[in-house]
Amino acid sequence: MRRLRLRSARAPRLLPALALAALAALGAAACGESGEERAFVPGESAREGIAVPLDGVDYEIFITRQLNLADPEDKQYYQGRPAPPGSALYGVFLQACVPEEAKGTRLASGRMRVVDIRGTEYRPLPVGRDNAFAYQPRPLRPGECEPNQASASSYGPTGGSMVVFRIPVTATENRPFELEIEGRPAGPRKPPAVARFELDL
């Protein structure tokens, strides 16, 4: 591809202006795409890194990754039994926060499940309240988060609290996987609100 020499006497005088306009348009488009990727659309599954409000609590998935209990770091995250042959353990690291402008205490939900594209559900494994990295559903005051900003999980490499799921290796072909967080029922005989996240699994 030949380069356009903007300073060449042969180039039309409009060429520099057109080039600058094209660069500006590309920059604006890139910014727009970035903004769209970070936006949460109500009723749709959010991507990791996007906060989703549910019952006055903002939930955000930081990272989802397979846990290798032979690795010293992962062994600190989960002290349970290794996954049986044909299965793998996956840690979903998330944060739940109540906005500072909120009024009153809100309860972070502990009702979670992972669902694959075929509708198969996977429930969290028990981790233990003595695990410093385990997600703990609890009441949160305005401006407060789970994990607490002074906790070990907050300072860890992932920055979030962990929920662990065991998923068959063959089932990983049934992407996309979604994490569903269930809120309070919307009313008598009405289903609860649900926040959904598409996991990078």
Image (cartoon, helix red, strand yellow):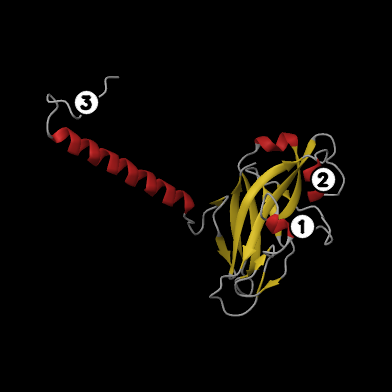
Q: Are dots 3 and 1 in contact, CB under 8 Å? A: no
Identify residue for label 1: 134
Circle 3 packing at 10 Å, graded few (<14), some (14-19), many (20+), is: few
Q: Position of residue 177 (x, y in %)?
A: 63, 45
Which numbered tag is attached to residue 5?
A: 3
Mark 1 or mark 3, which is nearer the start of the sequence? Answer: 3
Circle 1 packing at 10 Å, graded few (<14), some (14-19), many (20+), is: many
Q: Is residue 181 above or below residue 30?
A: below
Q: In this orientation, which residue lies closer to the viewer: 131 or 176?
A: 131
- Disc 2 secondary structure class: helix
Q: Quadrant of residue 113?
A: bottom right
Q: Does residue 48 appear left or right of residue 39 in this picture? A: right
Mark 2 vs mark 3, foreground winner is: 3
Q: In this orientation, which residue lies closer to the viewer: 137 or 177?
A: 137
Q: Quadrant of the N terminus?
A: top left
Q: Position of residue 200 (x, y in %)?
A: 61, 43
Amino acid bearing label 3:
Arg
Q: Are dots 2 and 3 in contact, CB under 8 Å? A: no
Amino acid bearing label 1:
Ala
Mark 3 or mark 2, which is nearer the start of the sequence? Answer: 3
Q: Is residue 13 above or below residue 150?
A: above
- Disc 3 secondary structure class: loop
Mark 1 or mark 2, which is nearer the start of the sequence? Answer: 2
Identify residue for label 2: 75
Q: Does residue 19 appear left or right of residue 116 in this picture? A: left
Mark 3 vs mark 1, foreground winner is: 3
Amino acid bearing label 2:
Lys
Q: CA distance from mark 2 to mark 3?
A: 59 Å
Q: Position of residue 82 (x, y in %)?
A: 85, 42
- Disc 1 secondary structure class: loop
